[in-house]
Structures are given as C-alpha cells and as structure tokens.
Amino acid sequence: MLINLDFEANEPIYQQLTNQIIDGIARKELKPGEGLPSVRSLAADIGINLHTVNKAYQQLKQEGFILIHRQKGVVINPDGVPKADESYRAQLQKKLRPIIAESICRDVDELEFLELCQSIYNSYKGGTTS
Amino acid sequence: MLINLDFEANEPIYQQLTNQIIDGIARKELKPGEGLPSVRSLAADIGINLHTVNKAYQQLKQEGFILIHRQKGVVINPDGVPKADESYRAQLQKKLRPIIAESICRDVDELEFLELCQSIYNSYKGGTTS
C-alpha cells in the first residue's frame, strides 16, 4: 500500500499515517491478518521519525485495528476491527457535531452534506483507490 | 454563552473553545455583530491560559467567524460567516473521509451514518442548546 504524507498540512504526520492505514482497511486493500512493515522499516521507507510511526501504530493498536506481536510483528487485526459500540457511536457524534456546526454556519444545507457523505461511502464500495 | 471545557479530553483546549464558539454561531445563540469577551477576560473567566484563548480567537478570525478590532474588541463577523466555497468543500470532504473510513471498518452502515448526520442537523434547527 502506498503511503502519501503531506508535510505541509496542519494535520500531524502520525495522524495522517493512522488515517491512511484505516483507509486501506476500509478499502479492503489491507486485509485481516495481513502484515504491516515494522516501525523501523516503515520509518526508513517513508523517511519519518521512528516515534511518529510508533505513535500511529500504538493508536491503531489501542483502537483495535492492528495487533503488535513480539514475534509475528505488526498485523491487521485478524479478527477484524471491533464493531461500533455505544462508546464509538458517542465518539462519532462528538466528531461530527463541530463539522456540521461549521457547515451550518457556512450555509451548507443538510441535503448537500448528506450527499457528500453518500459519495464518500460510495467511493469505498468499488474498492478503488482515491 | 456558557463554555464547557473538558480538561481530560484528547482534544486541545483551544480547539474545544473554537468549536464551542462555532457551535454557538450555528445555534444562533451568538449573532452577527455580537461582542465576545476580550482574550484577557475570557482567559480569566474560564481559568485558562491567555495564549490558549488567543490561539482560538486567531483561528476563528482567520476562518472568518469573528473580527478582532483594536477598539471595538472581538465581535462575531457582522457580515456573517463566509459561505462555503470550493476550498471549504474540499476541506470538508477531507475531514469526513477518515471518519467515514473508520465507520466502515466498524460496520456502521451508510443509512445509520446518514441518520446520525440528520439528527445532528436537526438538533441545530430548534435553536436549543445541546
């Protein structure tokens, strides 16, 4: 899987890396049980700090996306990512509220917002890269 | 307007403050031209650092939510928040993609996601606090 980082962006690099791995899982390009590079080799490959990769991997591990084995290395959770529970749903709502509040301030109406979400959902259905 | 900060949250305090002011504008509790407390007095009122308030205000100013006058002080943009343009729409899509990717990984289907967005949109229509 190709990792594209934007070093000019406001978003921290570890967060970009985390998001791209989650994106790969959503697109089914990264499959349950599939191996990921070690912290050291990924850091060297993309030319970023070990700690940055480590922070991304630790977050992904904590949220159930990957497992980190001492021997087998880093793998996409073979049991699949834990399904949404009440705590995830509450967190999702908390993330969406400020985005929707800003959209309301900027006169993006509900229909346009929902259509944008639909088109993003659709972009994951084909299994294509975007 | 009441400001509620969660000092235990992962989200930086300045971002929480920014989001709450945007939320107040979306709920029409904060109206165009309305004054906001000075950096100094808001920092003292809610017991946070001057720099934290300043960072929130600078971000809000940059994004067109508020004006900072040397004499009149801080006011909600009297001309209203700038409407969504192509750049905002691109940024909105960029913010939504990782949230939707994670929801797909966690088996939140499109319908549930859209209904959640609708319910958040609805919560701003009544003009009630939430």
Image: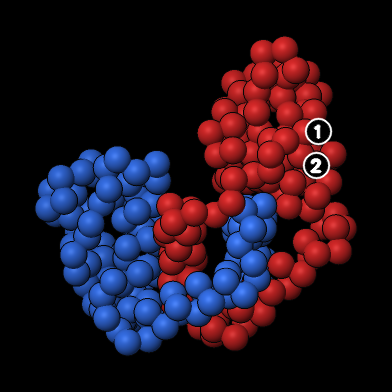
Chain colours: A red, B blue
Q: Are marks 2 and 1 in contact (CB under 8 Å)?
A: yes
Please, which residue is most extreme toward the front here? A79
Vertically, is A71 above or below B62?
Answer: above
Left or right placement of residue A51 versus residue A43 in this view: left
Q: Residue at x 43, y 52 (%)?
A: A87
Percent position (x, y) of residue B53? 28, 50
Percent position (x, y) of residue A44? 77, 19
Q: Is residue B51 visible?
A: no
Circle 2 residue: A31
When asked about the image quadrant of residue A74, the answer is: top right
Percent position (x, y) of residue B120? 44, 75
* Label 2 chain ID: A
When asked about the image quadrant of residue B121, the answer is: bottom left
Vertically, is A63 above or below B54?
Answer: above
Residue A34 tag number: 1
Quarter of the image for the C terminus of chain B: give it: bottom left
Left or right placement of residue A83 versus residue B76 in this view: right
Vertically, is A124 above or below B123?
Answer: above
**Category of crowding for the residue at label 2, using alpha-carbon neighbours closer than 10 angstroms: few (below 14), some (14–19), many (at least 20):** some
Amino acid on which disc 2 is placed:
Lys
Question: Which type of secondary structure does the marked residue at label 2 adopt?
Answer: loop
Separation of residues labelled 2 and 1 (CA atoms): 5 Å
Percent position (x, y) of residue B94? 65, 59
Question: Which type of secondary structure does the marked residue at label 1 adopt?
Answer: loop
